Image (spheres, rainbow, N blue to C red):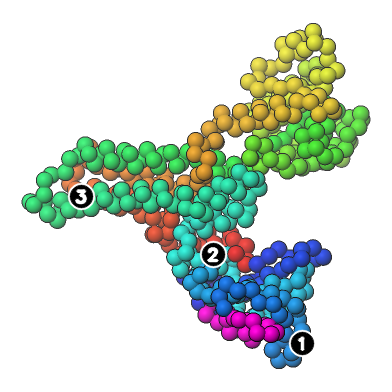
Amino acid sequence: MSEVFATTGTIAAIATAIVPQQGSVGIVRVSGSQAMALAQTLFHAPGRQVWESHRILYGYIRHPQTQQLVDETLLLIMKAPRSYTREDVVEFHCHGGIMAVQQVLQLCLENGARLAQPGEFTLRAFLNGRLDLTQAEGIADLVGAKSPQAAQTALAGLQGKLAHPIRQLRANCLDILAEIEARIDFEEDLPPLDDKVIISEIEKIAAEITRLLETKDKGELLRTGLKVAIVGRPNVGKSSLLNAWSQSDRAIVTDLPGTTRDVVESQLVVGGIPVQVLDTAGIRETTDQVEKIGVERSRRAANAADLVLLTIDASSGWTEGDEEIYKQVQHRPLILVINKIDLVKEDDRKNLQLQMPNSKSKIVTAAAKNQGIDVLETAILEIVQTGKVQAADMDLAINQRQAAALTQAKISLEQVQATIAQQLPLDFWTIDLRGAIQALGEITGEEVTESVLDRIFSKFCIGK
């Protein structure tokens, strides 16, 4: 391994988020061959408590030289191989805050442990065979999950629901390779290969790879969320829409146009998908320098968003200002939100619809009265589904690394089919078939390089 992941020695790190004056418990985790010896050096357990694996001891952390009391703690003991890393692991459960856990960590470092690198505990779990790479990535996804659906998908990966089909595909490729190589080595003793059978098997494997690749967009959506920008002229009800949607008073609402001067954000979950909603300043020509900055930021937010909610004031009708904004955002995924519909008579609503562009997605709301939010969320989910980001198998969602490896495996299999069609010798069949096997092995970690491990585990937090 590289210097970044020198997986020797005993490592220690704070394993919980530490916030001043918040949190009742802080955990210092230690893993390695000297973990037990270090715990016995620092931890004093009064009475006749038994130092056995998977026991929790009550006691005190004392400075080994001065015997000064550092903290009153619990000690959790997990001996190899029944631990997260399959090494000896001890955890000091200290009082929360900053000072207690930092002092305990410092004592660990002064008495033989070194500070763990980001993701090093999980890396050791992988290298010691407790986890494969898909499970390790599932842990990172679970820690960073922004919605219940994202957490469930991460848990599915942690439970091996992605690794199992990948291993089966790789095993199928290995079976085909064995059949081909047997014919190369023992051509005179075995019947010739049936090309049609081999092609049929490869097509089945490629079809399953295609199915898995279809979950990539869903995976990205669950991990990063959907960025939605509410845009429109001043005073059309954009801030009221944000407040009604988020059920809060995040944005200031007045009857004065131009109240919102900057982009206001709110985090929501719609249909299990994390949504970052941006309430932008009203877009119009202005001489106010501060408002100009806000308008420019609104335009940038609209261009960077995954979805634009172009909001209009139904009581004002479709104006030249609305038309100008529409021209700027019509190339983006778009929902036309006809707000303040409660101020328009029923007969006038049809005329308003005729004035507007023929957008595929239009909804009506009365944000000030909390009406139409459910319709808005339904429209958003319909656009998401139209974009084919919802996969049939809700338990699986591959990431970019896994998608790249699956794509390479599919290309290799297509090349095998082309080689067979060209009636090239059997040796040529094995070249790309081995490429597919290697690509599939990279997903689970059965075939992996040091650079891949560096890239994956460097994204973890320290202590995990």
Residue, disc 1: 68
Q: Which residues are magenta?
A: 32-51
Q: What label does residue 57 carry, if any?
A: none
Residue 90 is inside the magenta segment:
no
Horizontal and vertical percent position of residue 144: 63, 53
Q: Nearer the viewer, residue 175 or 355?
A: 175
Q: Secondary structure at mark 2?
A: helix
Q: Which residue is mark 3?
A: 180
Percent position (x, y) of residue 135? Answer: 50, 56
- SS state under label 3: helix
The type of residue carrying mark 2 is Thr
Q: CA distance from mark 3 to mark 1?
A: 70 Å
Extreme residue in the top direction: 347
**Residue type marked 1:** Gln
Q: Secondary structure at mark 1?
A: loop
The answer to which of marks 2 and 1 sits earlier in the sequence is: 1
According to the picture, the residue beneath numbered tag 2 turns out to be 122
Hey, what amino acid is under mark 3?
Answer: Ile
Q: Residues within 10 Å of mark 2 (few under 14, many from 20)?
A: many
Give the CA distance from mark 2 to mark 1: 33 Å
Quarter holding residue 355: top right
The answer, for residue 146, to whether it is visible in the render is yes
Q: Quadrant of residue 415?
A: top left
In the image, is 79 to the left or to the right of 143?
left
